[in-house]
Amino acid sequence: MLAILGPSGSGKTTLLTGLGGRLVNGHLKGVITYNNKTFSNAMNRSTGFVTQDDVLYPHLTVSETLVFTALLRLPKTFTVEEKTAHAEAIITQLGLTKCKDIIVGGPFLRGISGGERKRVSIGQEMLINPSLLFLDEPTSGLDSTTALRIVSTLRDLAKGGRTVVLTIHQPSSRLFYMFKKVLLLSEGNPLYFGRGEDAMGYFSGIGFSPLVAMNPSDFLLDLSNGILSDDPRVLVDTPIDDPASIKKTLVTAFKTNLVENMKEQLQESNVHQVAEKLHEKKFTQWSNTWWQQFSVLFRRGMKECKHESFSSLKVGEVLVVALLCGLLWWKSNNIQDQLFLPSHKRG
């Protein structure tokens, strides 16, 4: 489990979305590889991504949310009963059994708690059993106890053979020591990468250590901001006072002390690594047929709107509008071709 720390604007979310192949409007330089392989459709199907904001249907129960997700995302080789059983197993694994029949809720509708809603989002990605799971600030807006429960769940997932990468803003000391590795960023530059329990020793070795006991994550965030401390009792014994100079010193120390060691570890892991073969043919088609997806989405839409008053007129109106939109999309390519044809070739 790798935790990416840093203040707001340090590049945590940008890095995470870039690694997850979701950076749409950004420009990346360099090469991103996974087990010495470039990002592909097969790799995309083996990764899960949990966004910071939980995008869930408020009027569906926890069980309905995960069952519909399983029906959509699991391969068509699974029967409906097997997909439902898989969703129930995820509910049990995430400790959502007590609230599985309660609606998810939203900003204007009371439902499950924030921590339970976050676990439902994680469960949606766990359904495909990803080998790599990305999470963007999964503890944001949660109290320390609920955040600890979420991170404990993620640690159990990592122990089960998955790689978990998450961004986190300001974890408590209990959370900090649960991370196997920590990456500290400042304005897009790495300041530290290694075991969480070794972070304070590293910064102490390069002349940055607090004089009183404090939360390691608080101290690391102060350093990434170029601030030693506002409290004179906690000042580090160094003549540097300018934040820009502090950041520059830390970046230089990272390149001097840690980069070569990281390269050696990477080479050793590549030598001893067992190549995992992902067959592209398995992922060339959708998980389910068009009709299966349509039927699941139609049932989910009807369930979500069960609180509204329905009439045959409203249902027919929605179907007609959907049909017209589909026809417009179907003919959109032909219309574009006609627009770009020379004037003497237009019909």
Image: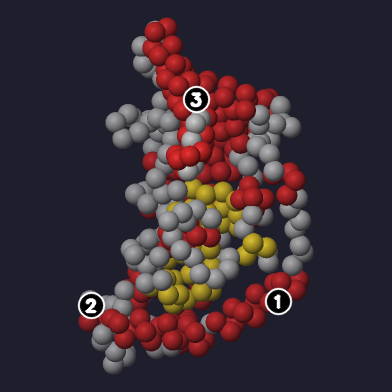
Mark 3 surroundings within 10 Å by alpha-carbon count, few (fewer than 14), some (14 through 19), many (20 or more): few
Q: CA distance from mark 1 to mark 3?
A: 56 Å
The residue lying at 53 percent from left, 74 percent from top is 194
> Which residue is rendered at x = 65% and y = 81% of the image?
264
Residue beneath disc 3: 327
The vertical placement of 263 against 125, above or below, is below
In this view, the residue farthest toward the front is: 344
Q: Residue at x 52, y 49 (%)?
A: 49
Q: Secondary structure at mark 1?
A: helix
Residue holding disc 2: 231
Mark 3: amino acid: Leu
Q: Marks 1 and 3: which is nearer the front?
A: 3
Q: Helix, strand, or loop for circle 2?
A: loop
Query: What is the C-alpha distance between the residues marked 2 and 3?
Result: 66 Å
Task: Calculate the distance from the C-alpha at mark 1 to the C-alpha at mark 2.
Answer: 43 Å
Q: Is residue 4 above or below residue 77?
A: below
> Would residue 83 be visible to someone looking at this image?
no
Residue nearer the viewer, 305 or 311: 311
Give the foreground label among 2 and 3: 3
Colouring chosen for the image of the structure: secondary structure
Q: Which part of the image, by quadrant, shows the N terminus?
A: bottom right
Residue 263 x, y percent position in the rendering: 62, 79
Tell me residue 286's x, y (percent).
65, 37
Element type at mark 3? helix
Q: Earlier in the sequence, mark 2 or mark 3?
A: 2
Q: What amino acid does circle 1 point to?
A: Glu
Residue matched to label 1: 268
Mark 2 vs 3: CB contact within 8 A: no
Q: Percent x, y for residue 75?
A: 68, 35
